[in-house]
Amino acid sequence: MLQAEHLTVRYGDFTAVDDLSFSLNAGDWLMLAGPNGAGKSTLLSALAQGLPYQGRVTLNGQNIRSLSPAARAREMGVLSQHHRVEYAYTVEEIVGLGRYAHERGFLFHRDSEGKNAMERALEITGLAPLRHQSALALSGGELQRVFLAQVFAQNPRILLLDEPANHLDLKYQQHIFDLIDIWRRQERRAVISVVHDLPLARRYGSRALLLHKGKCVRQGAMDQVMAPDCLRDVYEMDVYAWVRDLLEPWN
Amino acid sequence: MKATKERFSFLEYALFTLALIFALLLCLCVGSVPLPLSDTLRALWRGLWGQPLPDGVNKAILFSVRLPRVICVALSGAALSLCGAAMQGLLRNPLADGSTLGVSAGASLGAVIALAFGVAIPGLPYAGTMGMAMAFAFASLLLILSLAYALDRSFSTHSIILIGVIFSMFASALMSLVISFAGERIKSITFWTMGSLAGSNMDHALILLLALALCGGVLLRHTRELNAFAVGEDNARNVGVDVRRVKLTVLITVSVLIGVCVSIGGTISFVGLVTPHMARMLAGPNHKRLLPASMFLGAVFLLLSDLAARTLLSPIELSIGVVTSLVGAVAFVIIFRRTRKGG
């Protein structure tokens, strides 16, 4: 459904993403991996249309540049890493914003489909009991769940995630990833995410794309891309030995 | 916490309207020449249908002085407060307002230049001054926001306010310069820095009403987008808001409305800062409730401020801006302290 051809992003003279091509099918979870500065977040920002790029990205055959912001939001959702809320919006109000691109007509009426989508999002994320709570009173983990519920309510075909849980404790990390995984399977949606935590990427991803200095080193099935020799070349260390050593004390 | 409805109910609107009518009548009756309420009501009713007025009511005071002034005060209050609420949402900045951002000072400078150099559009009275005030308001807003962005990429609340304050001083200095050269042609500097609606007439009221209806309509059509911006500009982009278009639309609309208000009443500071906060406490941050609540509260707040300005030191009349600034400065400190705490 998503096809990127010869995608290049430059910051002045510096090429952050260099001639990248890949495709994504419904139900895929593509993990973008690579060391710092490899171009993972830049690639994600280009797809989310925050950054100008060269090349061609199509969604079901349609160039994403030709989509209006609302039409793009119906196809592609983004969950950012950090959120800071200034005003005392309720959980329900923030989740409801996810329906923005779907509301039409003179009064932007929220139809029953919209209400159902919202209810489902609140239900899946376990936020239904907190729906009238002010977002100012929530913890970081709860707030991340609120924005996850928002993007579920938005119900896009593709979900883009930039390190969605790396500032959360382990319980919330697992929770957020499980929620996304269930949603992806149930609704047959595709996910692209930037993840630094390689064991986490292996656990949840169906495919991976390994980047190094803006170029694609390898892409495809998880096992191929996460092969020890391939990771050693890119990360300049024995990743497998390191992860094994980390777990050693618990064995 | 209990659920709140997205929009106000009919009953809530009726209550707001009652409060507004009460404030309007109070301002009509109280003054250096007090008018009894029953006579005032009868005179208004008869005046509406073109019938002769009852004895004992001074027609000139009621219809030529107090009524236009009171209407202008209410409309300006509603307009300035609406602008403040919209800007605070758009910039996600609880201290944003025409006066703190320097937009009002910019508009004043435009109006003063138009008056000093005789910028006028033939056949359309006020249009030259208002056009210049609007253009300068928008230019100031663009200048301040781009300066703030150039100096501080994170676009933080504090740098925007700081630049707004510096710009206001700069615009005031230029204004004094223009006024000292222009001499008799321009109302006193106090009018442009403190504001006054003492000399308003029915033409002013009509222009304000049209501007408020038009710009208010545009802003009320953008409540969903303002909610998205108030949660965060990135979030607005993620949910599908055409960020650039909405930003430009809201900023232009706000500039036009502030331009009109300033060219009629001078710079009335802090109304757009204080009342949206009161409205937020009353109605919550959702702009579907916040914008209408801000308009009603703004109107009532400015009516009461004007009443205080007229009566506190009677027979001396204060500038309305003196009263709003006194209240506003205190409110500013409280709000600033709250935002520093991260609340």
Image (cartoon, coloured by chain):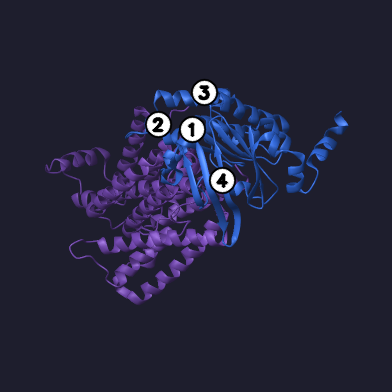
Q: x and y percent of residue A18 in the render?
A: 59, 53
Q: Are marks 3 and 1 in contact (CB under 8 Å)?
A: no
Q: Nearer the viewer, mark 4 or mark 2?
A: 4
Residue A21, numbered circle: 4
Q: Which of the chains bears the disc numbered 4?
A: A
Image quarter where the C terminus of chain A lies is top right
Q: Position of residue A242 (x, y in %)?
A: 82, 40
**Dot 3 corresponds to which residue?**
A120
User: Residue drawn at (77%, 40%), measured in percent from left and top?
Assistant: A228
Q: CA distance from mark 3 to mark 1?
A: 11 Å
How far from the left and from the top, in percent, is residue B112? 34, 67
Instruction: Give me the C-alpha separation between circle 2 and circle 1.
Output: 22 Å
The chain whose colour is purple is B
**Along the viewing direction, whichever of B224 and A185 lies nearer the viewer:** A185
Q: Are marks 2 and 3 on the same chain?
A: no
Find the distance from the CA under tag 4 to the CA under tag 1: 27 Å
**Which residue is tagged 2?**
B7
Alpha carbons under labels 2 and 3: distance apart:
23 Å
Q: Quadrant of residue B191?
A: bottom left
Amino acid type of the residue tagged 4 in the rendering: Ser
Residues flagged by tags 4 and 1 on a common chain: yes
Secondary structure beneath disc 1? helix
Classify mark 1: residues with Cα within 10 Å, few (<14), some (14-19) or many (20+): many
- Residue behind mark 1: A154
Residue B49 visible within the image: yes
Disc 2 is placed on an element classified as loop
Q: Please indicate whether residue B48 sits to the left or right of residue A92 in the image.
A: left
